[in-house]
Amino acid sequence: MNCMNRIIKISLLSLALSGGTLLAQTKLTDYVNPLRGTTTLWEEEDLGYVRHREARTWGAETLPGAALPNAMVQATPVTMYHSGSGYQYEDKTIYGFAHTGKGHWNLCHVPILPVTGRVDPTDYASPFSHDNESAHPGYYQVYLERYRVNAELTTTLRCAFHRYTYDPGDDKEVLVDITRSNNNVREWTLEKAGQRAFCGSQWGEGKIYFYAVTNYDIDGITQYQGTGRPRRGGAVPGQSSVVSVITFKDSKGAAPLEMKIGFSFVSVKNARENLEAEMLSSSFEDVKAEADRTWETLLSRIRVKGGTPRQKDLFYSTLYRSFLWPCLRSDVNGEYTDIRGDVVNNGFRYYTDPSFWDDHRNKVILMGLISPDVACDVIKSITDKGEKNNGYMPTFFHGDHASTFVAGMYRRGIDGFDLGRAYRLLLKNATVPGREGRRYGEEYFARGWISDKDTTNLPYYNEFKGGVQKTLEYSYDDYATAQIAKILGDGPSYELLMKRSRNYRNVWDPSTNFYRGRIDDGSWYKDFDPYYPYFQHMWREANGWNVLFYPPHDPEGVVGLFPDKKAAEAKLDSLFTEPWRGYELENMTGFIGQYCHGNQPGHNIPWAYYFVGKQEKSQYYLNMIMDRFYDMGKEHLAYAGMDDAGEMSAWYTLTAMGIYTYSPADPEYIVSVPLFDEVDFTLSNGKTFVIRKHGDGEKITRITVGGKNLRGWFLQDEDMRAAKPLDIYVK
């Protein structure tokens, strides 16, 4: 096959797999476009402000590569280091294919690039075109123009399969960029391990080991000194690197070069065992087909009827995106490297921490509903880490939201973990100051709120305590931990924590009808402007409008902070209509008035109208958000903001179904109007829970569960698990 014919075939494949409508769609995986969420927003109409800086705003920062649900390995292209997942759709060159990814400017272990000819260690990236690129669940393909190589990737849980088709007559070589990742690489090894094998390790955010087998005899491995290469914000001045080039005997052979690579965070031996168990005897097509079947099985847990092709594309793409993180870190033999650096085997699969600040709102609950075995092992993993970290449950970034995850899982009947062990850690977080626990906990425990810096004219990016945000979030965490205390019969702790769950009121300023920072003497922060956003001062990645209706465990109490429901409704109306003041920020985009969908703090706000008696207003904005913010930009592949390990995606998935985790610690779901006429949700108990929409419009006139009228707006989890049909009547 000549080069032009190959390009034409690749282009057709890209069109078929990209979620388009050229071919009849017979599988749910055909609706998924892994390239969704990889682009950056550039235009004023998408951003919500006029661009003046050259810096990119944050897109969803998702990875387009091959992966299985919650797997150890994500085989994905790198177009720029230290830039989200390493891939930006607008970039035009590929530096390699990495093997771990998340979307938070970290990971991207062990980048590998097929090359040919004499390699320049300072210049080896290959141009590529999206016309010759395709992505599908468990599969990624791109044509590397510089080296005339069609690169294909597929994966198992712990292994990656690379297939490189070179032009006839070209020498086959592989460049291992062993000193590069999205983290600072502390040390590395790479060596030949047999006639057709090589192995090594790379230490950068975890020490990962690998063992690779090729279908060509290895001639040698040569190391070259390189230089720093582009990263987010420019080159790395003076930073050197080492690239290793693997050459092969009979390298002009007709067969594509194939590499099967096992990975482990324990040892090369375990990496080899992972490879032998998962991939060694399989062909590329076998692994690719199995990856597709795995995703089809997961996606088919939720089947929708009605809706437009675009809505189905968005629904299944966001459902797919919700199941890439957290990631597996234990091997087929059960071993993992724990937080102390010891190799242990405790009989469960060991996972990375969820991104609790982001995805405690929805994604981890969705994960538990579809993959309860994974959710249980995640809780076992964080419990193991906490017990080995001075007895504090791990926190993430801001807040203490493992509490909402543990409470939300157990109260939904997912109880395959030791609740008492998890509770001891959560209770220590909630009551004992310590570096590993809640930040500024000593202030919060002593007086029920956290102070903010007494200063003026703070720029957005300065980081201080974020006292208002922490006070709000800790009050919710107290509520979540209190629910576990009640289950376990710890009455005194329950009473204490429930009292603290009302601490959000301590930062409410009735003179402004906003949450407002308090300085150390208890007086209100004077330089107060609810329109001005902060990275972490008073609020976290928000302004005063975007935290207005938090926390979620007491929505009636939050509405009660206003003079009356009419005043609360008027405030909500202003929130969605007061124009954004033009502040140009990388991590706040996608506005409806002051509401920012491109960052998480306000994601519960659209439902607040329910609690002032105006559900139809909520639905108006829910529909607007789903319609506007998930296929933005000229390519229709951008999110309004970062996906943040699946939180943005899970928001869409659950909202489109008509059941959202308004208070994830509580075993209930706020009901809204689904996008689809019917949703069939196969539960982990084997039963099918059906959601049906009757009529068109935004106002819900009646809700029945199992044929009986629902009082209020919340579907109880026990009714869902009993598979009582949910019927929603609208006009």
Image (cartoon, rainbow, N blue to C red):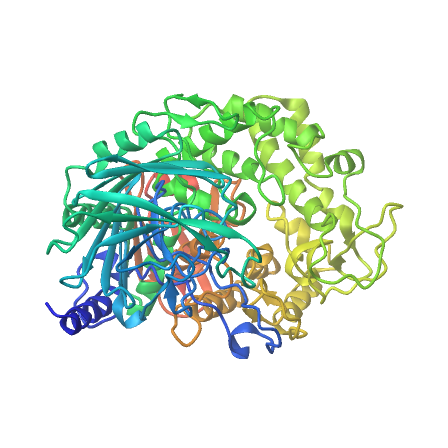
* Quarter holding residue 630: bottom left
- Residue name at image x 69 percent, y 63 percent: 533
- Residue name at image x 58 percent, y 73 percent: 54
- In the rendered structure, the answer to whether residue 358 lies left or right of residue 264 reads right
Whether 497 is drawn above or below 317: the answer is above
Give the percent coordinates (x, y) of residue 726.
36, 51
- In the rendered structure, the answer to whether residue 353 lies left or right of residue 705 reads right
- Residue name at image x 68 percent, y 39 percent: 501
Whether 242 is drawn above or below 271: the answer is below
* Quarter holding residue 159: top left
- Residue name at image x 63 percent, y 71 percent: 584
Q: Nearer the viewer, residue 60 or 591?
A: 60
Q: Please state, as top left, top right, bottom left or bottom right, where the N terminus lies in the image.
A: bottom left
* Quarter holding residue 679: bottom left
Q: Is residue 671 visible?
A: no
Q: Nearer the viewer, residue 62 or 429?
A: 62
Give the percent coordinates (x, y) of residue 242.
43, 48
Whether 358 is drawn above or below 489: the answer is below
Give the percent coordinates (x, y) of residue 588.
59, 64
